[in-house]
Amino acid sequence: MLFFEKKKITKKEGVMENLLYYGDNLDVMRRHIKDETVDLVYLDPPFNSNTNYNVLFAEKDGSKAASQIHAFTDTWTWNQESEAIYGEMVMAGGKVSECLQAFRTFLGECDMLAYLLMMAPRLVELRRVMKPEASIYLHCDSTASHYLKLLMDAVFSPQNFKNEIIWQRTSSHNDSKKWAQVSDTILFYAGQGFTWNPTYLAHNPRYVEDFYRFNDERGQYRLHEIIRTASMGPRPNLTYEYKGYTPEWGWRMIKPKVEALDRENRITWSSTGRPYLKRYLSEQEGTPISSIITDIPPLSHAAAERLGYPTQKPEALLKRIISASSNPDDVVLDPFCGCGTTIAAAQALGRPWIGIDITHLAIGLIKNRLKDSFGKGIGFKIIGEPVSLPDAERLAQSEPFQFQAWALGLVGARIATSAKKGADKGIDGKIIFQGDKQGSFETVILSVKAGHTNVAHVRDLKGVLDREKAAIGVLISMQEPTSPMKTEAITAGFYESTTWGKKYPKVQLLTIAELLAGIKKVEMPPIKQVGATFKKAPKVMKSGTEQGELL
């Protein structure tokens, strides 16, 4: 159940509004994004790699939490829905239809075909919302990259294929019976007149050491040929004498230019009397970026920007793509935005953005990420989340798990689903905060109830508190708590923080209505040192870019 406002993409004073959608990206694009409004698309869809991705949480003390959430199963199955999509796409005709028919002939009714049928209508919609000169980057791996390339050719035309980019996502991998898989593939397509901003990296220190071996008052320089070689052939109009030297095949420039360079002390003569041009390191822009990216490492477990999301990509990778293929005020779209790396990179670079994800887990994570990185004043609109009690009720009835994730997001909690059945019975979410002792941490456990609640639920929460030795327990419900529930909650007593000199109710009862209205929140010590849902994203610092970073 989606709770979309009747809102299309609009511009404010020439700048697109930042929009974050909850829902199926196919439905969102069809209903809410106008034709030819997007300048750059990056998508990192599931790869059909038959991998079960679990979000594993690590506590702040470094130990792994028992809780985890099953984010998604990256696998697809041929079924009636696949058959229906196939029929629709084939009936539409055109190159995409022909491509899918060829896939079916070759692959048969298999899981890979089901995956490609999931991707096909979404790529078609992306083509519709992209401007004619827009660029698109599809991030995938070797499992399906060759099929996706053919599908992209059908949607965007082979003539618009620009590059296959290889990103070395890890330095080592234990694949004992095959070549180690250490890279991902990024397929780059763009229309005629597409934006391309030349991007350079700092020269490799070894390269500088080997080639820029000379110094003068202007700095390091290398020797560059100023005369023609035999392979270039003779140029009579460039064959002249200068300072007693006449090269056999001629000079590489006209005589006035040579004279001007010599006056600037840009020409040096070897011991054999051969002239060379001085090329100074300070005048070089750096090394142009290539289609093989080895200088952006994957996110380590200890990386400051790692949030705990299973498929999170480094911001540096997205900043490189966005900087190269867009300009300020160009609209960036990520239809599988996950933990929001594309959105964060676009925001940092001054690009308006559109993000879409199908889980409230991701939406809640992105909200916290933007707030932590850019402050509470960052402007964006969330479309598709419940905004009223009737909306919440509909979500609870149609998608109970998504309701739970959304409700926990209202208080900045993380989902706590047990990796071991029954281990976390009674716990739907957790918040971790700094304890009174240095290096100690305390837990707030949360229980979310969409249906009828009574005093037994409060007693159960008290029992879970004792079992888990948690500091505070919170019951979030759709219904107003009864008087017996409030009395039972009071009997639990208080959690006292000596650091903050305050007492906090040990059992707290909150309603969805109160949370939506902003009149109540979880009473607890501040969590400045500890992230709630995932790790806190680092705050973006406003500073210049160094040569070693993206230029």
Image (cartoon, helix red, strand yellow):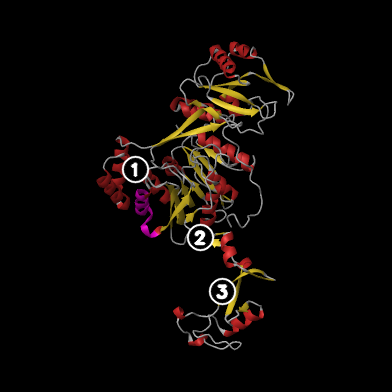
Marks 2 and 3 close (CB-CB < 8 Å):
no
Dot label at residue 224? 3
Residue labelled with disc 2: 196
Residues in magenta, as a range: 146-159
> In the image, is residue 483 part of the stretch drawn in magenta?
no
Q: CA distance from mark 1 to mark 2?
A: 31 Å
Give the crowd class for mark 2: few <14, some 14-19, many >=20 residues within 10 Å: some
Q: Secondary structure at mark 3?
A: strand
Q: Amino acid at mark 1?
A: Leu
- What's under tag 3, amino acid-wise? His
Q: Compare residues 284 and 378 and report the one nearer the observer.
A: 284
Q: Quadrant of the N terminus?
A: top left
x and y percentages locating residue 527 in the rendered image: 65, 31
Relative to residue 479, is residue 119 drawn left or right?
left
Residue designated by label 1: 117
Say few, some or many: other residues with alpha carbon within 10 Å of mark 1 (under 14 / 14 to 19 / 20 or more): many
The secondary structure type at the circle numbered 1 is helix
Callout 2, which amino acid?
A: Trp
**Residue at the left extreme of this rendering:** 105
SS for dot 2: loop
Q: CA distance from mark 2 to mark 3?
A: 29 Å
* Residue 17: % across, % down: 56, 46
